[in-house]
Image (tube, helix red, strand yellow):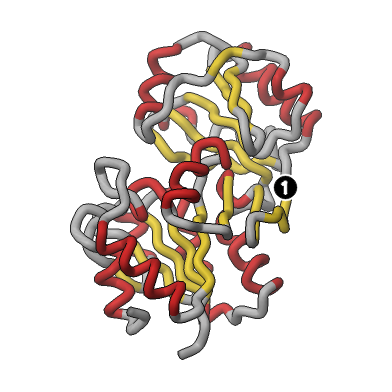
Amino acid sequence: MTRKLIAFDIDGTILDSNKRPLDSTLAALKELRAKGHMLTIATGRSYLFAKEVIDELGFDHYILCNGAGAFVENQQVYKNILNPSELKRFIALTKDMNIDTAALNLNEIKRNTNFKPDIMDEAMQSFGQQIPEYDEDFYHKNDIYQVLAYFDHSLDGHFEADFPEFRFVRWHPNSVDVIPHNGSKAATIMHVAEQFGFKKEDTIAFGDGLNDLEMLQTVGTGVAMGNAEDSIKEIAALVTDTNDNDGIAKALKQLGLI
């Protein structure tokens, strides 16, 4: 069997609705590894928020911050941070608009503002985290891979023209990820694939959210979970069962990998 590079989103994909991996998923990962496939996490989370899942599920390859950082055998092989001067300008503008933001490096997250803590808290709770601590100087002193901007759909498309170096990827009704424009899960997966000798047709990705759309379109086989957004299901090569009903294991069986 040809060796595959297989990428898994975390929330809504490799974790069920209770934020736990299914037994069928754990068994599938064990079998894939035994057969020699390369498995990676591909998440919007930073290492801070992904570490528990990475460790519990035994991953030593992981793509973080929607592609802004990549690690192979726990060593960083790719780094793509936000432009510091443009980031400063963006945070100044959002402050003027009373929009909260939080800045992330790989291991920490700090919020820059405190306009609407309830909105920030709702978004963070959606993946089991607390509102970030306040430190308005954090982004000045660190390499920032990603910013969370807490605004709703009414401002979708508002910032792109003024900030062409940034991409705005919605992951929650009240929050978007701000990442480098040339960065994405898709681009980083293909970078890793090329670096380690995988053809496009031998790359597979599982996802459920809007930040997975380009990834599922770009890899050789994009698998949408049964709980995925309709727009994700429409572009996927394969739609499997939900993250609560053995979706990953069922898709891997259908693909003949387990």
Residue on which disc 1 sits: 80
Q: Position of residue 133 (x, y in %)?
A: 55, 16
**Residue 149 appears left or right of 82:** left
Count of all numbered marks drawn on residues in the image: 1
> Which residue: 69% across, 17% down?
92
In this rendering, does residue 78 appear at all? yes
**Residue 223 appears left or right of 148:** left
Q: Quadrant of residue 144?
A: top right
Q: Position of residue 196 (x, y in %)?
A: 67, 74
In this rendering, does residue 161 appear at all? no
Amino acid type, callout 1: Asn
Q: Position of residue 234 (x, y in %)?
A: 33, 63
Location of residue 42 with respect to 198 vertically, above or below:
above
User: Toward the viewer: 21 or 148?
Assistant: 21
Other residues around mark 1 within 10 Å, as few (<14) / some (14–19) / many (≥20): many
Q: Residue furthest right?
A: 85
> Which residue: 52% across, 83% down?
3
> Which residue: 39% across, 49% down?
209
User: Toward the viewer: 203 or 119?
Assistant: 203
Q: Residue furthest top?
A: 115
> Which residue: 55% across, 30% down?
148
Where the C terminus falls, by quadrant?
bottom left
Q: For mark 1, give the secondary structure.
A: loop
Q: Residue furthest bottom?
A: 1
Q: Position of residue 7 (x, y in %)?
A: 48, 63
